[in-house]
Image (cartoon, grey):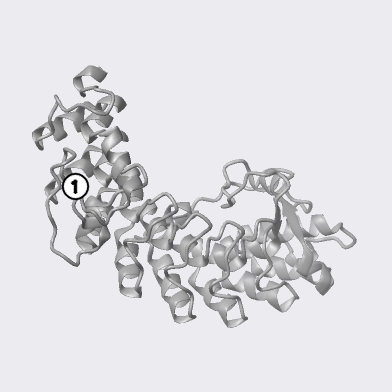
Amino acid sequence: MTATMTVPPRASGASVVQADEAEPMDVECSVPPRLSEEDYAREIILAAYHRDAARVASVLRLCGPKATAEMSLSRAAAVQLLGQDVYLGSHSWSTQEGFPVMYFAAKWGGAEVTKVLLESGARVAQATTLGVQPLHMAAQEGQVGVARLLLRHGAPAGATDRAGWSAFHYAANHRWATWVGDASGQLEVLELLAAAGADVNASDSEGYTCAHSAAQSGKTEILRLLKRLGASPDAKTARGVMPVHVAAEGGRAAAVDELVRWLPGALDAEDFRGHRPIHHAAYHGHVDVVEVLLRHGAEVQPGRRKKRAAGDGDVNRDQNSPSESPTRGADKERHGTTPLHLAVRSGSVAVVAALLAGGADPRGRDSHGWTPRGLL
């Protein structure tokens, strides 16, 4: 499918410079001199938003190199300029977060706009207040030409923002992209990043890797590429969350299927609560994910875990394995919550029916003595 971009119409009065409605805009004469730096930034950002490299060049001819390198807008000003529906893609909603013009060029402007800015003195790795660099935005949007240009100009392939997200994270989480369509651009950017030496298993401050990001987006083609690039499907966050938990919780049935085929032991992977993927899917009411997990052989009752062949990895050990940490074992024994308990608690009739059909025991009690029926 060909990618298309949803661009809100330019609001009346949004630009400092108004085009004559009856005549085609004369790019050379459209920007009067002696505007403030913020006004120039607004003009460049609007032009980048509409991929108008000629207009960007016209504005830049009136700015010095230093001004070009430093120009930025706050989130509040950018939203006012572009509209409330524009997602700027950041870890913060602070109205004072600064967004440099290179951010918008890499996110929406395309290679020509980015090239014009770089040649006029913009910094290749100029970051927002929270450390988001142009390469991160090119990766998120699948802007292959921009990513290639930035890397050629020395953008660090493995650079992270202040939350620890690398360009790999941004490219893998396709759902954040402005573009509507397939993930072909993101796939190419991932290949470029790997070729440039970026670490496919780099984790953020909480332990999330790009495999977690891909699981969240649900794009199986991204997961398959990450597998080829050497990503770890068993990467765990500080809370023991693996990509399969993320996919199950988000209702990404195809991604769950892909991850379990990639790592069969993921079926029984437990987070810090002792919850497996089927717990996450049941609690969030994702019957399609529950059915996928049941088809792969997920157990619906605690203590009925199937023994796995030796060498399959820690996530496949039997529940009572002595090598398992005492804390985790005690946690499971103390709570005893089954997927059926969680499905009843969430009110998902379809999941309850699927679990009962899969052999769940409606009389099983948790550590408080509650049966699933007793939770109704």
Q: How many marks?
A: 1
Q: Is residue 267 left or right of residue 49?
A: left
Q: Is residue 15 left or right of residue 302?
A: right
**x 64%, y 61%: residue:** 131
**x 46%, y 73%: residue:** 199
Question: SS for tag 1?
Answer: helix
> Dot 1: within a 10 Å radius of its alpha carbon, few (fewer than 14), some, or many (20 or more) residues?
many
Is residue 19 visible in the rendered image? The answer is no
Position in image of residue 254 (x %, y %): 25, 52
Position in image of residue 306 (x %, y %): 12, 50
Task: Give the quadrant of the N terminus.
Answer: bottom left
Quarter where residue 224 is shown? bottom left
Is residue 369 visible in the rendered image? The answer is yes
**x 29%, y 25%: residue:** 345
Seen from the viewer's position, the closer of residues 102 and 357 is 357
Quarter where residue 362 is shown? top left
Position in image of residue 355 (x %, y %): 15, 34
**x 14%, y 24%: residue:** 363
Residue type highlighted by circle 1: Leu
Q: Is residue 94 left or right of residue 273?
A: right
Q: Is residue 105 left or right of residue 157?
A: right
Question: Which residue bears the numbered disc 1?
Answer: 293
Position in image of residue 193 (x %, y %): 47, 75
Task: Give the quadrant of the C terminus.
Answer: top left
Tell me if residue 37 comes above or below residue 192 in the rendering: above
